[in-house]
Amino acid sequence: MMLTATGCNSDLEDTDKVAEFLKTLVTEIDMVAYGEPLVARFGEGIEVGISGVQLIETSAISLHTNDLARDLYLDVFSCKEYSNQDVIMVVDAFFAPAKHTYETVFRK
């Protein structure tokens, strides 16, 4: 699943909140985390944001944010099935985006 959420709240700029989001997402989509999430803020000018990754036993969850636009770009990659609606529910609960779009890609 590749999700773009636009017009998010200010929690999108908080590395602790983003780490908490990743941990919660893992639980809500019934995955098993491998270690702690890695979350860092970096960039310059209009490119400042947060990047984060949470390894899971069936692959990885990664995200990138943009402070200026308050956008979130999230990839949930797993060999184990999960509900896209559960992902959206967690994104909405944490970041209250004005809009989100997503697509699902199945690899063979």
Image: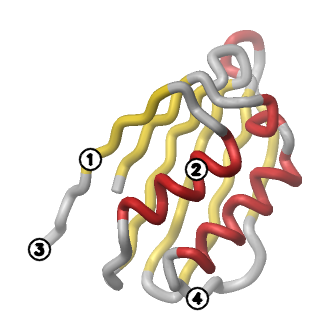
| 2 or 4: tag closer to the N-terminus | 4
Q: Nearer the viewer, mark 3 or mark 2?
A: 2
Q: Earlier in the sequence, mark 1 or mark 3?
A: 1
The residue at which mark 3 appears reads as 108
Q: Which residue is mark 4?
A: 32
Q: In x, y percent, where is residue 32?
A: 58, 88
Which label lies toward us, 3 or 4?
4
Residue type at tag 2:
Val
Q: Are marks 3 and 2 in contact (CB under 8 Å)?
A: no
Most foreground residue, 95 or 105: 95
Whichever of callouts 1 and 2 sits on the residue coming sooner in the sequence is: 2
Label 2 sits on residue = 91
Residue 14 vs 81, above or below: the answer is: above
Q: CA distance from mark 3 to mark 2?
A: 27 Å
Name the amino acid, label 4: Val
Q: Type of residue at label 1?
A: Glu
